[in-house]
């Protein structure tokens, strides 16, 4: 009687009994086949056994993440579901060890041309040295900018590798390109839809930014903007350019357009990194998840410098890994240019050089010969020099003003303003764990750029990121895949700007300082999606399996899109409106006073603790240099001048309301009722 084929339960029992070889002959045709695959098997891999297990793992991960949503948070049920997902993936890997057997890619010797044009490099060095000399007093001038750009162009020309342009074959089915256009369209919709109203109001940081932009438009051109403890320059010059081109004025919209463009430009690089990792479908999946994702969308819309960190992370990382793969020197030049430019964007990008160095070191360890290692060191020096030359203006400023340049970072890392609230090592470990799990658990409490106390990822993205991480770990261990290792190493490094907030651990995690990490996290999530689908379909998919895979993809995409839409345009919008003060409505009421004959200098906002930033009222009223604040000690000064006056006060400010009524008996009091709870204010019209 023939032996009965064992079930999955039998195989699981054998694993628990430490006898996995008992059923090995059922999992593979024979031992020879496992080590001597046919040509077709070498290209496609062996037929997967228990190919449905990753799908079940995905279902369990979705269940676990659903139970981590704030409305459904249940422990330890979420841990159990995620544990089941991990166990199913492990069982699948053990069941298909021949497909995941240790493999080191055989590559040709790693060699990059080291030829440079010395006759061009010499004048480039002179121009850059002169530019450094003239980058004085924290000012860009026509002279130092011309010298700097000329030096950069000559340096790039001296190291740029001339190559023949080869015609690229257009690969990809019509279906793929249709989906690509659809995903791109959906992503752009999520980024631009209702941009004026989400978010609706500015807060004090926006006032600081727009005052810096006004300085640029007035002819002041700093290298480093010292207002509000210091900021890098890129956003201010970009916003000034947008105002000149689109005539949008010194406004919230002008800031939004710049950061919106940064967010959208990040998406192609996410696709390209995903393509490098797992092919075009992996890139497309990553593009979709990032395109509709609440995290990237919010930090692009909030109109601060946050969006520049993921942009330059994505661009730098892509050209670096492509250069390591293609051995094209030009890719390393582009890596350096983008790395240096990123340092002018947002303070968190100062950790990018460490990420780049770590990737070079990782790749260095896999090289065998001295010549290969010499070539790699040369490329590292090229990247470092190129980035340094782009960073040159800030380097000069940092030498002249080291305390201001490092102030923001030092106050978080060192006890400058206050002492550590506990043991720094324990705080670091706690911050590290909180940041590493923010994708699933808690993205922090900062209402400006997040929905407090919810996961940074939606349910679908978090579940796929979990599975993608497992598959990436397997690729790193069993296949010796340096790219998956580089990505897994880079994600925690990109979280470090938030983790290192040791003095103020309540600021960790935060979506702004960890923004660079979302680039690779979405790539890993897209990789996890395609791995599940490809395993389920196998090398010869049937129509039934294709149908199931298509249905699963549609369900995941629809649920992902719907949840992220709700997160951004309902939940984030509502909680933001409840926290931000309605300076736009105050400015509109002041504008109405002007239209009714009131003079510009006769409208005031009486300050009150933790209320509106009176500079924002001026910006919203179209008078960006005007601060409408009138302190109570100055009421008498106004009383001495006859005319019609208009005062805005907080309803709780009963003392100043009473004082104004005493000083101006001929007054009319009116309560402006806002649609947003808690945002009412008092209007007082006075005829003196």
Image (cartoon, rainbow, N blue to C red):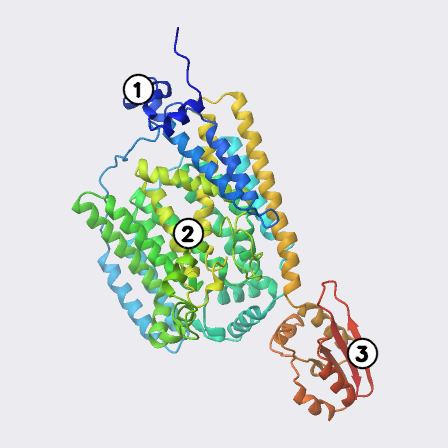
Q: Is residue 19 above or below residue 115?
A: above
* Mark before the other along the chain sequence, 2 or 3: 2
Q: Quadrant of residue 419?
A: bottom left
Q: Is residue 20 above or below residue 144?
A: above
* Mark before the other along the chain sequence, 2 or 1: 1
Q: How many marks?
A: 3
Q: Quadrant of residue 357?
A: bottom left
Q: Is residue 170 visible?
A: no
Q: What whole-number distance in Å separates the C-alpha atoms at marks 2 and 1?
A: 43 Å
Label 1: which secondary element:
helix
Question: Do tag 2 and tag 1 residues touch (Cβ < 8 Å)?
Answer: no
Residue 669 circle label: 3
- According to the picture, the residue beneath numbered tag 1 turns out to be 33
Q: Is residue 638 left or right of residue 105?
A: right
Q: What whole-number distance in Å separates the C-alpha atoms at marks 2 and 3?
A: 56 Å
Q: Is residue 358 above or below residue 126?
A: above
Residue drawn where x is 39% and y is 58% of the image: 429
Residue drawn where x is 30% and y is 72% of the image: 130
Q: Quadrant of residue 397?
A: bottom left
Classify the position of the N terminus by image quarter: top left
Residue drawn where x is 40% and y is 24% of the image: 11
Q: Is residue 218 left or right of residue 498?
A: right
Mark 3 crowdedness (10 Å alpha carbons): few <14, some 14-19, many ≥20? few
- According to the picture, the residue beneath numbered tag 2 turns out to be 315
Q: Nearer the viewer, residue 406 or 150?
A: 406
Residue 479 circle label: none
Q: Is residue 350 above or below residue 93?
A: below
Closer mark to the observer between disc 2 and disc 1: 1
Q: Position of residue 254 (x, y in %)?
A: 58, 63
């Amino acid at each position: 009687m023939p032996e009965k084929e064992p079930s999955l339960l039998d195989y699981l029992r054998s694993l628990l009994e430490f006898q996995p070889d008992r059923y090995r002959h059922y999992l593979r045709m024979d031992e020879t086949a496992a080590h001597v695959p046919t040509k077709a098997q070498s290209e496609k891999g062996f037929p997967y056994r228990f190919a449905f297990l990753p799908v079940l793992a995905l279902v369990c991960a979705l269940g676990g993440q659903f139970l981590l949503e704030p409305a459904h948070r249940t422990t330890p049920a979420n841990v159990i579901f995620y544990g089941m997902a991990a166990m199913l993936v492990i069982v699948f890997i053990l069941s298909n060890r021949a497909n995941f057997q240790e493999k080191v890619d055989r590559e040709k010797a790693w060699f990059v041309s080291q030829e440079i044009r010395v006759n061009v490099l010499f004048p480039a060095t002179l121009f850059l040295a002169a530019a450094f000399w003239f980058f004085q007093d924290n000012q860009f001038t026509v002279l130092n900018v011309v010298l700097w750009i000329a030096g950069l162009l000559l340096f790039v020309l001296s190291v740029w590798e001339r190559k023949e342009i080869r015609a690229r074959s257009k690969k990809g089915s019509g279906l793929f390109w249709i989906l690509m256009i659809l995903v791109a369209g959906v992503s752009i919709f999520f980024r631009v839809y209702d941009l004026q109203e989400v978010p609706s109001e500015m807060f004090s940081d926006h006032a600081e930014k727009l005052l810096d932009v006004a300085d640029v438009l007035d002819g002041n051109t700093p290298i480093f903007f010292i207002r509000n403890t210091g900021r890098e320059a890129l956003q201010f010059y970009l916003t000034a350019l947008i105002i000149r081109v689109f005539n949008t004025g010194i406004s919230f919209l002008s800031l939004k357009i710049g950061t919106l463009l940064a967010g959208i430009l990040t998406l192609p690089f996410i696709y390209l990194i995903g393509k490098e990792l797992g092919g075009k479908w992996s890139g497309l999946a990553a593009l979709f998840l990032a395109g509709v994702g609440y995290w990237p969308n919010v930090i692009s819309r909030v109109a601060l410098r946050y969006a520049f960190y993921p942009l330059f992370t994505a661009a730098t990382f892509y050209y670096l890994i492509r250069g390591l793969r293609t051995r094209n020197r030009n890719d390393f030049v582009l890596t350096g240019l983008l790395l240096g430019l990123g340092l002018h964007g947002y303070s968190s990008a100062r950790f990018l050089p460490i990420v780049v160095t770590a990737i070079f070191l990782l790749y260095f360890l896999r090289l065998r010969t001295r010549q290969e290692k010499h070539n790699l060191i040369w490329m590292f020096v090229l990247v470092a020099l190129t980035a340094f030359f782009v960073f040159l203006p800030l380097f000069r400023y940092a030498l002249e003003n080291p305390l201001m340049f490092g102030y923001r970072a030092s106050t978080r890392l060192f006890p400058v303003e206050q002492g550590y609230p506990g043991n720094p090592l324990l705080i670091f470990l706690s911050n590290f764990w909180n940041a590493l799990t923010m994708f699933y658990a808690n993205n922090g409490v900062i209402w400006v750029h997040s929905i407090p106390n919810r996961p940074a990822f939606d349910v679908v993205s978090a579940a796929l990121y979990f599975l993608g991480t497992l598959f990436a770990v397997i690729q790193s261990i069993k296949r010796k895949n340096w790219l998956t290792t580089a990505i897994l190493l880079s994600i925690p490094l990109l979280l470090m700007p938030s983790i290192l907030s040791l003095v103020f651990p309540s600021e960790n995690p935060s979506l702004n300082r960890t923004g660079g990490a979302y680039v690779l996290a979405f790539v890993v999530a897209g990789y996890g999606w395609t791995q599940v689908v490809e395993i389920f379909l196998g090398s010869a998919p049937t129509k039934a399996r294709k149908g199931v895979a298509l249905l699963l993809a549609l369900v995941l995409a629809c649920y992902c899109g719907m949840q992220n839409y709700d997160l951004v345009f309902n939940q984030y919008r509502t909680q933001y409106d409840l926290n931000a003060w309605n300076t736009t409505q105050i400015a509109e009421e002041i504008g109405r006073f002007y239209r009714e004959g009131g003079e510009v200098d006769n409208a005031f906002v009486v300050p009150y603790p933790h209320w509106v930033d009176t500079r924002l009222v001026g910006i919203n009223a179209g008078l960006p240099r005007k601060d409408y604040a009138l302190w109570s000690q100055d009421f008498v000064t106004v009383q001495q001048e006859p005319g019609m006056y208009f005062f805005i006060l907080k309803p709780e400010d009963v003392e100043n309301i009473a004082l104004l009524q005493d000083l101006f008996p001929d007054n009319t009091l009116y309560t402006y009722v806002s649609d947003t709870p808690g945002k009412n204010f008092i209007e007082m019209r006075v005829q003196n």
